[in-house]
Amino acid sequence: MDQLLINPGPPLLSILIFLPLAGALFLLLVNNENFARYWTLAVTGIAALLSLPILTGFDRGSAQFQFVEKHAWIETLNINYVVGVDGISLLLLLMTTFIMPFCVLASWTYIKTRVQSFMICLLIMESAMVGVFVALDFVLFYILWEAMLIPMYLLIGIWGGPRKIYASIKFFLYTLAGSVLLLVGIIWLYITNNYSFFIPDMMWQHYSVTAQVLLFLAFFLAFAIKVPMFPFHTWLPAAHVEAPTAGSVILASILLKMGTYGFLRFALPMTPEATVMMMPYVLGLSIAGIIYGGFTALAQSDMKKLIAYSSVGHMGFVTLGIFVLNQQGIEGAILQMINHGVTTGALFLCVGMIYERTHSRELLSATGVGQYMPVFVTFLGFFSLSSFGFPGTNSFVGEFMILAGTFEYSIPLALAAIPGAVLAAAYMLRMLQKVVWGGTDNPDQSWLTDLNVREIVTLTPFLIFVFWIGLSPQHFLDLMQTSVTNLLDNFTAYSSQYMAAADLIVR
Amino acid sequence: MEHTVSYLVLIPLLPLLGALLMGLMYLVSCKGKAFPEKIYGIIACIGPALTFILALKVYFGLKGLPEDSRYLVQDVFTWIKVGDLDISMGFFADPLSSLMLLFVTLIGTLIHVYSVGYMAKDENFGKFFAYLNLFLGSMLILVLGSSPVVMFVGWEGVGLCSYLLISYYSTETNNVIAGNKAFIVNRIGDLGFVLGMSLLFWAIGSGGFDYMSLRANAEQIGPGVGLAICLLLFVGATGKSAQIPLYVWLPDAMAGPTPVSALIHAATMVTAGVYMVARFSFIYAEVPAAGTVVAWIGILTALLAAIFGCFQRDIKKILAYSTVSQLGYMFAGVGVAAYSAGIFHVFTHAFFKALLFLGAGSVIYALHHEQDIWRMGGLKNKMPITYWTMLIGCLALAGCPPFSGFFSKDEILFMALASGHGGVWLVGVLVAAMTAFYTFRMFFVVFHGKPRDEHAYEHAHESPKVMTVPLIVLAVGACFAGYLNIPSIFGGHLGVSHWLAPSLTEHHPHVSVWLEVLAVATSIAAFGCGIFFAWKKFYVATAEEPFYTGLANFAYNKFMVDELYHYLLVVPYKLLGTAISKSIEPFVTDGPVKVVVWLYGALANAFKVVQVGYVRVYAIYMVIGLSVLSIFISRSLNL
């Protein structure tokens, strides 16, 4: 168990998992909408604060899992409750706890019906998401992975837009179908690894190549749908368009990251040979996603759809970075996961703020808003810049690192990815042109009020992170460096061993 | 270490802080009562003025160092450090950047002052100056960046400000579209820059990615890779500096306020491409083939823009095409490896072109936003200061000795001839004649002859001091900037070229004096021809706009290049986007999903047939079931 580091002190990770759940249980007893809002804000806020000691106590020089807790759960099947974080999951965990309070703030007036139930869904969602990022037991992981779907399904299905039923069912079934094979894979791994579900023990084992390929395909289906990679993305625009603002933010910022997190946590360490074999195809799909997402976003007239398709392109960059399998690429990809969470989350918040006023997500009905909402437009402008990778903002650093990594792997591939940047500028500028500037023949927007204090408070932290990561990414990269180096070292060691073995057989 | 200083970062930081402060002030006050213009004006001008002082400090600091190690550096913090990739947010000043610094900050300051007058009573006064300060800060990052990546921050930053300021009068949809066009065309160029940068990193980046290390390691670049790097970087330059084929955004950019056209789209930002080529002279000098491409693209752009310039009727568009044309000269200069000549033309051009734009702004201001030269005329007596300063600007642009443009343009043409690029030189001389022609066509029509619009003429007046003083200062610059680099044939000693020498990789060819005399003589003759035809045709009081037919009409319509791009590039892109989202996305990509859903439905329907809901049918099922069961039981019990 040398991969584990059990830190002294309170069981922080368990608190982070169970605190929101307890908060949700308490809300069941409450019948006061306003209290529900403040209560949820307080619970998510406390969870965010409690995640800070994990950051400060995290030993960035170690690639071990830290803050580990281990308890027996179902002993007959050797299922344990094991949680822990390493450099790959730490930032994602922190992003989850920090985005949740802002989702509550964004829903403050947006959600008018069944407020308690909505808040309960948010809290259960948080428990499940935190759990997915820290679970070290495959059963625990799988249960939470599927458990996330239910509150999200309800968020879309109850508080969503006009086609909410279609969107929620498509979201639920599509992602559920993807993870069925994952379960098969897990059971195979369980049997192969002496009836243990312990994730770190499953890594860097010498499974046969056929088994690896099959396992990789099972992983790939589950994770690629979640990311979503082209061509498995069609559930995303529907879900985004119909989801309430908080739902869109959670979906874009956190849920999509679980797919890419899955690749890093499971696919690379458990099926390295299959990863190397499948790498060209995954890279091809990533490029296709970047270009396809960009072109599709260019043609959208619905702001949420536009941002949803832009997500397909941005997540294409992330998978590109992961599968070029070098330091720049993977660190860039992890950073870009955070960046996408910050930027796209903020963009969905912005669209939600317009929607709350005009009750339309159409670009045309928002034309000329800029004149009456200068503060809003300033925020929107900065987030749009970040979205197309403007130097000085967060996405530039991430995309630049990914491209540098891609260049090292293959120049033509990098060339293919770069037009994505022009497309990104084109569709974001098109949105800005329509929304912000507008022409002389606008709908009358003079009755619009600019952002209120709550909304400014909601958006400002996102803006701070846009520039913090953009100008000083080193703070963030330091946290992941050791873990990524370790991952790659293991990977090369494993492949060279495999190559040597293959050599012997050939001789 | 004597080369490490702590004040370089202040140079871009001061205007950036000004931008932040004014931006916040504007946001806070935009709902209620705006802050008085005076406060904005003072904050706006103070940053640029201080940067000019710092630029002087940099200049004298460099001058105090021995010639072969003239540079100052400041590393502020480590920006990105992963594997081989190690980029620090650092600044670097050498003679080349100090020259750029000096004129950017000087002209920047003057244009800020001028704008206080020009933009008076604009409802978004604060926003304008926030953008303008942001621009200056970005431009200074571009000039001072210690590595290509930091330069790229400024490079994109100036592009953003250009976009924001072109779209400034945002109630006109066309202005916003012009802004988008500028940004997207620039973005296409930036791809080249990013690719060139990445290739450079791939080739020699592991030895450090700041300019000093790059220059030291430049020899390790193979010729093929070197050519690719040069051409890709040049693609970036064609975007930012409006060269063929990406020049189309600059004329449209004139939609912005006139001081913006002067500062961004004439004097500073658009010359960034030339600066970049000169900055990378250590690579370009090794790849003459790349230089030839640069020179020919440059001189052909100069020719094309000069042709368009002869037919325009919007005063700002005439100047815009003249800018494109002069930028072409600069690229011809750096293309024939005469980097110092190219940069010197950047320097003098900044003065006279800023002067011309501000003068044009003064005219536009006086005529209440009239920009059509065929509705002007006879303004000489109404606006004497504008008239005389504009005359100096026009003479400098047309290349009349001894004004500044003459020396810098002549140096480029001479170097083209001396380095064996006879064709470039010949086209250059032709363009010089055309330049004189269209410049004075504009000048005579605007200031001489009879007023073509009596009403506007009656109300015309000289601009306030806050606008005319910058004009006068710039006119002095346009007169005398050329004396900083007088060639030996006129008894000078090429001061600027010597100052720049440590930054550039440049070889001065040795040629006979007669060749130089020939070059000078043809330049003067070209200028004479051009101005003579303009005088002949447009000096007369009754000159009217000619009616264009045939080729002239084709040129008047700018050879339909914009339309060509629209139908060849923009429309297909949009169609592709629509096609994907309307047909491919729902039917092809989502198709399998829909098929699966349909299959499940079909299966369910198939089973539904037996679930009819009548008791009698279920009774039959029961009978059938019971009989099957009884047969089964009887068989298994062997009865």
Image (tube, rainbow, N blue to C red):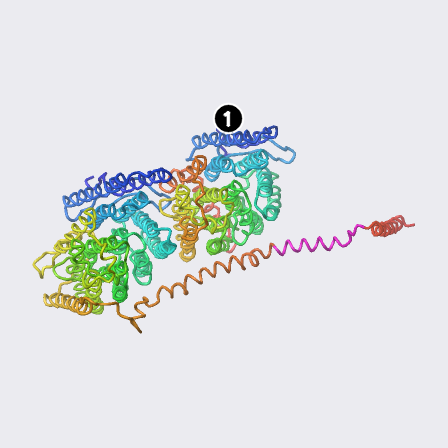
Indicate whether A147 appears above or below B474.
above
* Quarter of the image where one finds residue B323: bottom left
Q: Where is residue B451 in the image (x, y as percent from the top left)?
A: 22, 61
Which residue is more in the foreground, B609 or A209? B609
Q: Where is residue A367 in the image (x, y as percent from the top left)?
A: 44, 50
In magenta stretch: residue B30: no
Q: Does the magenta stretch include residue B597?
A: yes
Q: In this view, does A429 lie to the left or right of A278?
A: left
Q: Which percent across, then down, holds residue A300? A: 49, 54
Is B541 displayed left or right of A455 in the figure? left
Instruction: Give B497 or B353, whichever is nearer the viewer.
Output: B353
Q: Which residue lies furthest to the top in this view?
A: A9
* Relative depth, front residue between A212 and B203: B203
Q: Position of residue B476 (x, y in %)?
A: 14, 52
Q: How crowded is mark 1: few (under 14 residues within 10 Å), some or many (20 or more)?
A: few
Q: Residue furthest right?
A: B639
SS state under label 1: loop
Boundaries of the magenta span: B594-613
Residue at (40, 53) in percent of width and height: A440
Residue at the limit of the structure toward the left, as seen here:
B491
Q: Can residue B420 be seen in this view?
A: no
Q: Name the chain letter of the residue that bears numbered label 1.
A: A
Q: Place residue B34 in its image quadrant.
A: top left
Report the residue marked by disc 1: A10
User: What amino acid type is highlighted by mark number 1?
Assistant: Pro
Q: Is residue B125 left or right of residue B470?
A: right
Q: Is residue B548 visible?
A: yes
Foreground residue among B508 and B248: B248
Predominant SS along the magenta part: helix
The residue at the point 61 percent across, 49 percent down is A166
